Amino acid sequence: MAHAMRNYMEDVVKHTLKLILPDLDVCKCEICQMDMMAYALNHLPPKYVVTPEGELYSKLAELMQQSEVDAEVALIEAAKVVSKNPRHDRKKG
């Protein structure tokens, strides 16, 4: 059985951004979303896991709630930073 290593926080940040993005008063283009996720991930501790395929989430339930709260806080800060310094073409954003 193959094993994989991943940073669980990437999944948490992506999921959390989808939940809070509609309520954020920021550009929602792909570039800004990626910048917000990168900013948040650079300000959160990684949570690497190594599990057989199919078991990735079964062992992480206890991490999920606090990780989502931490991700939301980091993403709100990221939205402030990215909206002040967008990298996209402002005409397209």
Image (cartoon, grey):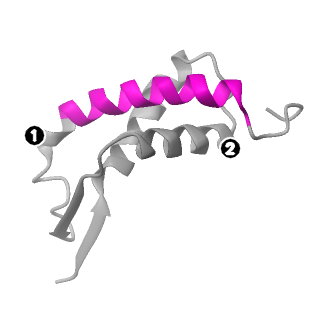
Residue type of the residue flagged with mark 2: Ile
Horizontal side of residue 83 vs 61, given as left or right: right
Position of the C terminus by quadrant: top right
Q: Which residues are magenta?
A: 65-86
Write the residue at 30% across / 51% down.
46
Closer to us: 13 or 55: 13
Q: Residue 35's x, y, as percent?
A: 60, 42
Horizontal side of residue 9 vs 22, given as left or right: left
Q: Which mark is residue 10?
A: none
Check disc 2: other Cα within 10 Å, few if <14, some if 14-19, many if 20+: some
Closer to us: 32 or 80: 80
Q: Is residue 54 above or below residue 65?
A: below
Q: Is residue 80 above or below residue 43?
A: above
Q: Secondary structure at mark 2?
A: helix
Residue 92: which quarter of the image? top right
Horizontal side of residue 89 vs 55, given as left or right: right
- Residue tagged by mark 1? 62
- Residue tagged by mark 2? 31
Residue type of the residue flagged with mark 1: Glu
Q: Residue 85's x, y, as percent?
A: 71, 31
Q: Is residue 83 magenta?
A: yes
Q: Is residue 76 above or below residue 56?
A: above
Q: Residue 23's x, y, as percent?
A: 52, 16
